[in-house]
Amino acid sequence: MKKVITYGTFDLIHHGHINILRRAKEYGDYLIVGLSSDEFNSLKGKAAYYSFEERKMILEAIKYVDEVIPEHNWGQKADDVQTNDIDLFVMGSDWEGKFDELNEHCEVVYLPRTEGISSSKIKTDLFNNKC
């Protein structure tokens, strides 16, 4: 079985999130999502609308996702890859080159982002009444 992992906050789920989850799952048989905890988001200066438990429940309902694990810090990715016998690490192209050190443990792939959509754009559009 080929195992794939990706990470993110996955707040305000949109078609860009679904695209990366679908494409990540196409690379293997089992997809694990490392979901940023509320505490980790706070450390990153990132505000999420939904709590960790709510975001986890939403992700678990998506057919491409087999398992959701908490992400507590930047440094845990190598441990997660080794502990979960990961074959492939997937992130969006906006992270290109940032996780290349994981190549010593698994293959690393950066997938193109979906054009024209992001959680930040949704928040900005809502704030500016552009919907």
Image (cartoon, helix red, strand yellow):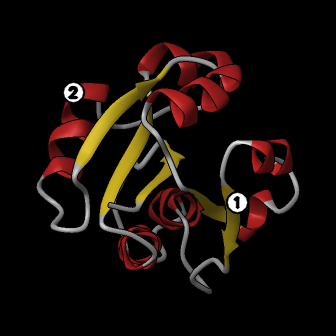
**Mark 1 nearby-residue class (10 Å; few <14, some 14–19, many ≥20):** many
Query: Quadrant of the rendered structure where residue 61 is?
Result: bottom left
Placement of 88 over or under 7, stated as above or below: below
Q: Which disc is residue 56 wearing?
A: none
Is 16 placed left or right of 103 in the picture?
A: left
Identify residue for label 1: 108
Classify mark 1: helix, strand or loop.
strand
Q: Residue 26 at what x, y percent from top left?
A: 39, 80
Q: Residue 12 at what x, y percent from top left?
A: 36, 54
Please say whether residue 45 is visible from this viewpoint: no
Q: Earlier in the sequence, mark 2 or mark 1?
A: 2
**Residue at the farthest front position:** 1
Q: Which disc is residue 53 wearing?
A: 2
Query: Quadrant of the rendered structure where residue 30 is?
Result: bottom left
Is 75 placed left or right of 123 in the picture?
A: right
Alpha carbon separation for disc pair 2 and 1: 28 Å
Classify mark 2: helix, strand or loop.
helix
Amino acid type for the residue under numbered disc 1: Val
Check if mark 2's residue and mark 1's residue have beta carbons within 8 Å. no
Q: Residue 39 at what x, y percent from top left?
A: 49, 13
- Please give the name of the residue rendered at 46% of the width and 68% of the height, measured from the top-left corner: 129
Amino acid type for the residue under numbered disc 2: Glu
**Mark 2 nearby-residue class (10 Å; few <14, some 14–19, many ≥20):** few
Placement of 58 over or under 94, stated as above or below: above
- Please give the name of the residue rendered at 44% of the width and 62% of the height, measured from the top-left corner: 126
